[in-house]
Image (cartoon, rainbow, N blue to C red):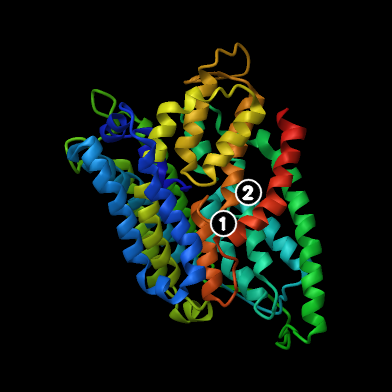
Amino acid sequence: MHWFPAAASATTHVKATAAAASASIPPWLCIPFVGLLLSIAIVPLIKPDWWDRNKGKAVLVWSLLFIIPFAITCGIGRTTDVVLDCIFNDYLTFIILLFGLFCVSGNITLEGDLAGSPRINVILLLIGTLLSSWIGTTGASMLMVRPIIKVNSWRKRKSHIMIFFIFLISNLGGCLTPIGDPPLLMGFMRGVPFFWSLHLFPVLAFNAAVLLLIFYWIDRYNYRKDIAEGWKPDISKPGGKVKIHGLHNIFFLIMIVIGVILSGTLPTIPAFKDASGNVLGIHITSNVTLGFPSIIEVAIILSAAWLSFRTTDKTVRTKNHFTWGAIQEVATLFIGIFITMQPALILLKLHGAELGLNQPAQMFWAAGALSSFLDNTPTYLVFLTTAGALGFTSGLSTSVGMIPLKMLMAISCGSVFMGANTYIGNAPNFMVKSISDENGIRMPSFFGYMLWSVAFLIPVFLLDTLIFFL
């Protein structure tokens, strides 16, 4: 679900997580997580005004419905460690990263006579998809979302554009390098070569070609209906040139990416470890530590956001219709998601090896199904470790064992690709939805979006299975 923020904590998960995984917990503790997801999916449809005013209260209630029974069942000390570890080592860096990218991307705007035609939209989606592997799915999403919204601002029918944006830029495009999505960084830190992920290019190329072709036909149909109803782009400005304002903010985006990469690589350096191999940092409790790599990451990201605002004229943000609503909504909802999903992650870590998965196709769908709703980083690690323990004698040698290339491809693609199946499957998904809603694009509901993913993504993933993973 996360981008790189989970990387530091996933590589050196503190004693709290290790303790939590050492003893079984009752599956019914997953109910608050399911309840929160259903609330996000259903309540906005039934009581939208109430939800807008009270979503924070709903998140608090569902979080307490997990925390209190967990404390009664597993003890106050263990509960404190699990919740604080989640907040400081997962949520804090997650929301700081989104905040930084949100701020910096909001200071870049596009102007000119570029109208959102099917051809232009395909080109922009393709550019964003390729960028995702080099600045991360979150970085590419935040960089591309406003330009695509702007060039299509004259369109009446445009929600499908943002849905395919989430499919391609916010998810599938991040599979080619460890920079693109955190599961691949976890593989890199366990002995998978940095450029090994380029083995996934044929899968990405196939998926992107199929989805862009489908998108083109859908967009052309809606484009023609818009034109027939009299919707026309305003391309009356002279010159016909496209101008990008605030382009210097690309430097601050790169600065954020560097900070995130450091958070994943510094924990492997001896200078950041104690004698026992634990990452050094600030002790929140005796069992929970906020590592120095995460602190460095947060400092770099906040510095980039501050410098971006200081060096960019506010008229750029005005042209982008920049507000704080989207980041506030994501911050509120995801703290509840992060907290309430802890039992599911613990159970997955405990019992993932017992699922009897030993074929690439099985790994592809199991990793993908769980990554649609849970953090894809621990999901990837569970199945990577499981594959490494199956006793294969050929394939790629990693620190968790020998893994056949097709098996590793299946785990990687499932974890990265299927985050597109739901709004909560990957961090930028909900952010793109929120920014789209703010700009007057009527995005589908939680279940409405899943209808799109079932209709268009699942058939593509079935083809992936037949072509690449059997």
Badge 1 density bin: few <14, some 14–19, many ≥20, Cα 10 Å: many
Residue nearer the viewer, 93 or 162: 162
Q: Is residue 334 visible?
A: yes
Q: Is residue 90 left or right of residue 274?
A: right
**Relative to residue 290, is residue 319 depicted above or below?**
below
Q: Position of residue 336 (x, y in %)?
A: 36, 54
Query: Which quadrant would the C terminus be assigned to in this image?
Result: top right
CB-based contact (under 8 Å), mark 2 and mark 1: yes
Q: Is residue 39 left or right of residue 296?
A: right
Q: Position of residue 170 (x, y in %)?
A: 58, 54
Q: Where, by quadrant of the figure, is residue 361 drawn?
A: top right
Q: Position of residue 29 (x, y in %)?
A: 35, 42
Q: Earlier in the sequence, mark 2 or mark 1?
A: 1
Q: Is residue 161 left or right of residue 291?
A: right
Instruction: Read off the residue under disc 1.
Output: 140
Badge 2 element: helix
Q: CA distance from mark 2 to mark 1?
A: 9 Å
**Relative to residue 43, is residue 458 depicted above or below?**
above
Q: Is residue 282 left or right of residue 153?
A: left
Instruction: Read off the residue under disc 2.
Output: 173
> Which residue lies at the image location 67% right of the left edge and 33% below the top edge?
199
Badge 1 element: helix
Q: Where, by quadrant of the figure, is residue 309 drawn?
A: bottom left
> Which residue lies at the image location 52% right of the left edge and 40% below the top edge?
370
> Which residue lies at the image location 61% right of the left edge and 70% below the top edge?
147
